[in-house]
Image (cartoon, rainbow, N blue to C red):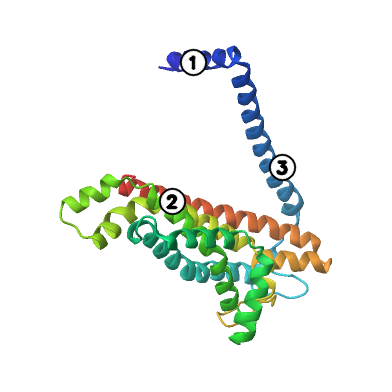
Amino acid sequence: MQAINRQTAGDKLRAYFKHPGSLVLFLLVMLAAVVTFAVLVFLIAYILVRGVPYLTPSLFALKYNSDNVSLMPAVVNTLLMILMSLLLAVPFGIFAAIYLVEYAKKGNKLISVVRVTAETLSGIPSIVYGLFGMLFFVTTLKWSYSMLSGAFTLAIMILPLIMRTTEEALLAVPDSYREGSFGLGAGKLRTVFRIVLPSAIPGILAGVILGIGRIVGETAALMYTSGTVAKYAGPMDSGRTLALHMYVLTSEALHVNEASATAVVLLVVVIGINALSSFVAKKLRQKTGA
């Protein structure tokens, strides 16, 4: 089998050399892959080299003060912000996608309007969301600088992303699944929630993972909504996330080394969340047979 695979690879390589255009395209694709991988490795190595030497026990103290600049409150606030934002955005995004794919009639003008709106919202800079959140949630609704104001703002930011990825995941489910369910006498609602949605869960989780990445790395929107108080925060309290904590330390120019160490922790948190989400998606894919 290995000999056959080797022979096949050799035949493909010889075919590339026979057609100069194919060879050029092959080299460009390989170059792009190598450059992308090299940039990723460089970024990770740079963060680790700059930050690991400054990972001290004081950074993980339970309480923040000007001496230890502990990041533990920011870690807890980051997890709380992720949970609150996803609780707000995921249900609306999934149900909107279900309507667009399963219930809206083909050729409905509302579908095109919703899609254009979602694409437009995806391209708006995060600082604009932050200004909107400050004017509406903080000032108009009088929620003040709070985790809730930040969570609602981030939920609006990631809603188009979750909706579009869910929509694509639902469209990828074969129509034969729906036809088979209808043929067995199942109704529309049962077909959507028992057949279609479980088959699309891996794709939906991919959108959720991207949304988590945007939540974890956001600073501009949270500066104007959740505030920068370095303490454990409840839903109506002001608090900073890890990315905002790192930004504040860097902007003060007093704890640049600690900011580099915070970047390492942020990198580990993001990788850990992505790995956990990928593991869950793999298990669900095995369970559903998708």
Callout 1 secondary element: helix
How far apart are the alpha carbons under marks 2 and 1?
A: 36 Å
N-term mark: 3 or 1: 1
Residue that appears at 26% across and 45% down: 176
From the image, which quarter does the C terminus lie in?
A: top left
Mark 2 highlights which residue? 168
Identify the mark nearer the N-term, 2 or 3: 3
Point out residue 56 in the picture as x, y percentages from the top left corner. 72, 61
- Whole-percent x, y for residue 228 in the image: 70, 75
Q: In which quarter of the image is the N terminus?
A: top left
157 over 137 or under it: above or below: above
Residue 206 locus on image (x, y percent):
48, 52
Q: Based on the displayed image, in which of its 4 quarters is residue 214 positioned? A: bottom right
Q: Residue 42 carries which label?
A: 3
Under tag 3, what secondary structure?
helix
Q: In this view, does 187 lie to the left or right of 123?
A: left
Residue neighbourhood size for the residue with mark 2, other residues' Cα within 10 Å, grouped as few (<14), some (14–19), many (≥20) = some
